[in-house]
Amino acid sequence: MIAVAAFYILSAIAIASAFMVVVARNPVHSVLFLILTFFTSAGLFVLLGAEFLAMLLIVVYVGAVAVLFLFVVMMLDIDFAELKAGFLTYLPFGGLIALILFGQFVMVGGAWVEKSVAAASIAAPTPAAAAVSNAEAIGRILYTDYIFLFQAAGIVLFIAMVGAIALTLRHRDGIRRQNVTAQVGRTREQGVEMTDPKPGQGVVL
Amino acid sequence: MSMNQTMTAELFFQQVPYILPEITLAAGALIIVLIGAFMGDRGSRLVTWLCVAVMLAAGAMAVLHMPPEQVVVFSGSYAADGFSAYAKLIIALTASSALLLSVDFLADKKLDKPEFPVLAMLATLGMFIMVSAHDLIALYVGVEMQSLALYVLAAYARDDAKSSEAGLKYFVLGALSSGLLLYGCSLVYGFTGSVKFDVISAHVAASRDIGVIFGLVFILCGLAFKMSAAPFHMWTPDVYEGSPTVSTAFFASAPKVAAAVLFARVCFEAFGPAQKDWLGIVVIMALLSMVIGALFALQQTNIKRLLAYSSIANMGYALVAIACGPEFGPKALLVFVSIYAVTSVGLFGVVLSLRTADGERVETIAGLSGLSRSNPLLAAALTMLLFSVMGIPPLAGFFGKWEIILATSSVGLLPLAIALILASVVSAFYYLRIIKTVWFDEPVATMVPVGTATALTLTGATFVLAALTLLIGLVGSAATIAGAGFS
Amino acid sequence: MSAEPHAASGLAETLAHVVVLAPLLGALICGLFNRFIGEKVAMFVATALLFVAAACAATIFIGHWNHSLHLPAKPIRLATWIDVGAFKSTWSIRLDAISAVMMIVVTGVSSLVHLYSWGYMAEDPHKPRFFAYLSLFTFAMLSLVTAADFMQLFFGWEGVGLASYLLIGFWYHKRSANDAQIKAFVVNRVGDFGFALGIMAVFFVFGSIEFKQVFDQIPQKADMMLAWGVFHLPAIEIIAFLLFIGAMGKSAQFFLHTWLPDAMEGPTPVSALIHAATMVTAGVVLVCLCSPIYEAAPATAGFITVIGAVTALFAATVGIAQNDIKRVIAYSTCSQLGFMFFAAGIGAYQAAMFHLFTHAFFKALLFLGAGSVIHGMHHEQDMRKMGDVARHMKITFVIMLIGTLAITGVGIPHTPFGFAGFFSKDAILETTFAAGMTGNTAAQLAFWMALIAATLTSFYSWRLAFMTFHGTPKWKADADHGHDHDHGAGHETSDSAHAHAQPAVAHVGEVAHDAAGSHDDHAHHAWHGPHESPLVMLIPLIILAFGAVFAGSIFYDAFVGHYAKEFWGNAIYTAPDNNVLKDKYSVPTWVFYAPLVVMLIGLAAALYFYLFNEGLGKKIADRKGLAHAFLENKWYFDELYEAVFVKGARALGDLFWKIGDGKLIDGLGPNGIAAALNFGSKKAVKIQSGYVYHYAFLMLIAAVALGAFILYRGA
């Protein structure tokens, strides 16, 4: 009962905040609504018994991605008001498309309910949910059955890394870099110069 | 043969040989990236050669280790068969050719860093996974692996605004298409309870769920984007034009083969029983691609944009081959896309060889005038490649289209064949216009013959590709074997 | 290559091979190798081979005539040409009376023309080409007359057409010659179309194109009808008619005659060989060869009679008003061919062949004689510019006189005294009258028309003789006569045919100018008046003169007399009720004398107009009377055809080209579509805006639309 109530509350908040992400005037608000959406989604995962995924969602998406978004939005000097100027022009047609898409999803959802495919087709959790913890179950298949895909996903991340470096790393000339050896290895003679200025005169360095 | 039991160490080592091409590429990439890191920009030429060698080795391995019939390994996510082996060979060949073409250009633009070949190789790995994908996750991972590398390649000239714009456009739209793809995947998973193609196929054969079909639509939309088939083609001209020409050469060849083959595999293998559902979508996409590819190209003045529309039209032809169904489609598709990819690399090779006296790269069609005087051999190669892509017998391009038309007549899709022929006629106009410019127009700028020692590799590669156009018999028989092994 | 085992090397077979193949060999050697063996050698080879062929042909002909040589019953098979299902054609040599006669005519005249050309064409720089064409023509004509099936006949038919085309336009510098050769070819095409249709009809009806098989089946097919639209017509009549259309074209019969006078643009030896003695008679040969068909097709035979008679009369009327010496003879040829045709039409095929035979001699003689005059007058062809030539060219004069006597048919009935034309023309007139007595209306008509035509023939032939050889000389011996182009002005006014748009003297002049250094003595020396031709030209004339005198009396009995049946054998078929050949002995006596009388009338008229009252003809011409203009302009046939066919075809072509092809097909088709595509693509490229959100939006729309499509289809 509580679970059902939680589900409806969480999903309602999730949908509402997702909507607000789009319509909010202030981009910072948008990002904050996005974080709220992540949180409620994590709540839904918990309701499904996937607490590991819920944790991942919060740690990775909220903790890293969304915060990064927030920084970027705050640091970039972009006139978001101007960007959204075209919003109203495209609203009628865009709204129509969205409406049709929504209608189509309703039909699909209706088919789901009507044919009650749910029970028959839902993938059986491997192994049984009661036997092991969530994280353990994922870990087991991730490194056995899905080893190929897991490694492939690793390559994807590797590409992202190489790509990011390729696009951003610059070797600029004339940049003074820290030379630890030189710093550590310098002697007192190199670092200290004794002068004896007369009163009323400065020191020439 | 299927190996769907729970993975054990023993089973793992038993299955590893099937993914040897992918392992080669991945391991090669990791090692080469280290070499590049240690050698710095000096090593970019060496790195390129190494990458080409590894890619060719991987392609050869795919063919040499081709199992006599389809083997599905790694819990149903990877299929090794003739279809994918042949596609991998073509991908490896065209990708490494495109990479070879890049050396001189990148050096010219001071972009010769080892990341370029490594990223190209990693994209190739993505393509390998794509053509062997046997479940929706592998499909998605392969697509993303390829796309992510290609986004970077598009933006590779990072100080060039057009290149950055191209990369960003490609990335944003690519993300949207991945969203569509994923949405479709989740719908299919939700309704069938599995991501594996054989399970999906069994489910589709048993019952026609609107959710599955709807998921199929979204998956096909996402794949059509990767294939640059209309109406998901909009990125193509802009990205082709903005990207460094070497990246464009890469985009226009191997990824098209991979996307087309993956598209075919999804249609034939995962959704084979739902042919009447996807047929309509494929036909619409094919018709739109052919019409748009033919019509829009008429107004182009930039060679790269023109070739972008040309590739859209050609993907339309490939979709016609897919529309012919699992019995006649695979062979026609393989013959066509392999010939197209080879020709496409050749065309870009010519474009890359064009340089005016003051070092400017030629990108407009008008700039080609006078090529016949400054470099008649190159002009002849360009003419031959264009005639091939037009479909003039006895050049290879003709046989590609011929196979498709044969397949359509076998399954009674003659209207599509007629549309194909009409589109070919219209597109012949803009190819012929290039030929006319090359041979008959007064030169506007003096072209320097690309005769320097470094440029020799480039022209050599172009000529080899042009000559390869003649080896149709080989391609045809290989594709027949590959297409027959696939069902 | 002999396919048939029976083709043992009998003498006749061997000779026949030589006759047919020697000219081909000559043509090949002369045409292809003249650069290697030299001009003179090439010409010599061609001429010598032709004389060999003529000797062989003469042996066959004489042998058949005096029964010393047996002609094989079956054609000699050389090689298979076409073998497609039931459609078979064989290269073969058919030996029978018709081919024997034609072989001697063709090779005889051809060899003499070859010889004559040594003199006549002496100044021409392209002699080997000329000789090669002549030999090629001879080969084609021989393969025509020796054909054993319709396909080889057609080959020869087209081969002689080609050679004729090439030779009419031999002086290709001349615009008028080019026009004339095209005209000849096009008009012949009309006939050939009918001929080809006829062959197709033959194959359709009989299932074979071999003469023997076709003719053997005629009794079975006599009542067969062919449906054509609402018409049901007898098959035999259709075939006969279509084949005759071909014959009309080749033999320049009424309606399709217009090319022949213009063909005189070719060198005179060509006119003598092709356009008088041999090719133009191919139509007559065809009709005689197909006598089994025409015997079974009375309606078409009647049509042939009428066309032949009309041609005879028409051409004769035109002939009296022409001033170009060659054109007069050309119309005379046309007229004489009409005689042959109506003879064949009434069933007297033997008489037709006989006239063909004698005509070959005297018409070749007349042409070559005229050529001699033209040569002597330094390429002047207008008779009004001649006169009193006899004094300077005595031998030519005598020879032309013999030719004139022969063509006008001088001879004493019931005796063996007479010129060749007398016997053959009399035979035709008598048989025609005899046929008329049996109630053949067409024959009655033909007889009277032929009688008038004979009168006119006599008139124009003597007119030619008098105008050319007698009276006061109208030429002046001056230095630049030969190349005086003004000269053509008078010529033109006298002859409105467009073929003479340029002075006839131009040809040699131009050719000679081209080859600097090869100027003949006429070209740059003062012209001292007509002179006799060289011996090499006179010898052929003398030989032909013998033929023109004696051919009639010697061969009368064999061709149309008591031995006719024996001589012709199976070559000519006459129906059991066709007795015209015998009936001709039982015609009233006046019929025997009528030709002689009409000849005298014509002679008297010619004497009155052109010898005793010289200048009277010119006065009549100058008066520009309607009748004279009508005749001089050849009944306005050229003008009519120009207006109807040439202009009509051009207008129709323009319509199809400019409106049909240009506006409709191109306008709505390629050009229109291209323009529409260009317009459409110009509009369409605007969609490609470059904005990411446009693209993204479009992708979403597309996804939704495809989803809607699937849902709609699924519902």
Image (cartoon, rainbow, N blue to C red):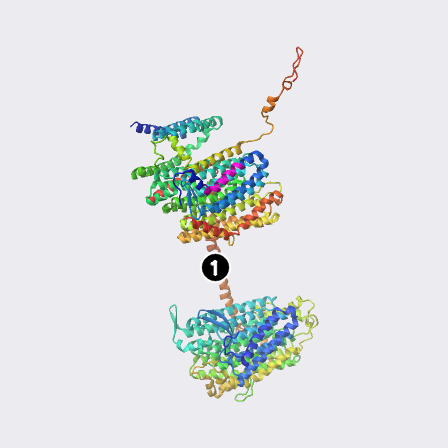
| The stretch drawn in magenta includes residue B26 | yes
The amino acid type of the residue labelled 1 equals Phe
In percent of width and height, residue C618 lies at 59, 75
Residue A129 position in % (x across, y down)? 34, 32
Chain of the residue that carries numbered disc 1 in the rendered image: C
Q: In the figure, residue C271 lies in which quadrant? A: bottom right
Q: Residue furthest front?
A: B10
Choose between C627 and C98: the one closer to the eye. C98
Question: Majority secondary structure of the magenta segment?
Answer: helix
Q: Nearer the viewer, residue B442 or A176?
A: A176
Q: Secondary structure at mark 1?
A: helix
Residue B228 shows up from this direction: no
- Bounds of the magenta segment: B16-31
The correct choice, above or below, for C584 with respect to A94 in the image is below
Q: Position of residue B413 (x, y in %)?
A: 40, 51
Q: Quadrant of the N terminus of chain B?
A: top left
In this picture, is C601 found above or below B214?
below
Going by the picture, which residue comes out furthest to the right? Answer: C525
Badge 1 crowding class, 10 Å Cα cut-off, few under 14, some 14 to 19, many 20 or more, is: some
Q: Which residue is mark 1?
A: C656
Give me the residue at 53% from left, 88% from top.
C413
In this picture, residue B282 sits left or right of residue A196:
left
Of residues C59 and C323, the one drawn nearer to the viewer in this rendering: C59
Residue found at the far bottom of this picture: C415
Assess whether residue C543 is covered by the magenta stretch: no
**Image vertical order of residue A195 relative to residue C121, above or below:** above
Which of B50 and C132 lies nearest the eye of the viewer?
B50
Confirm whether residue B126 shows in the render: yes
Task: Report how many numbered discs are placed on residues in the image.
Answer: 1
Measured as percent of width and height from the top left, residue C620 is found at 57, 75
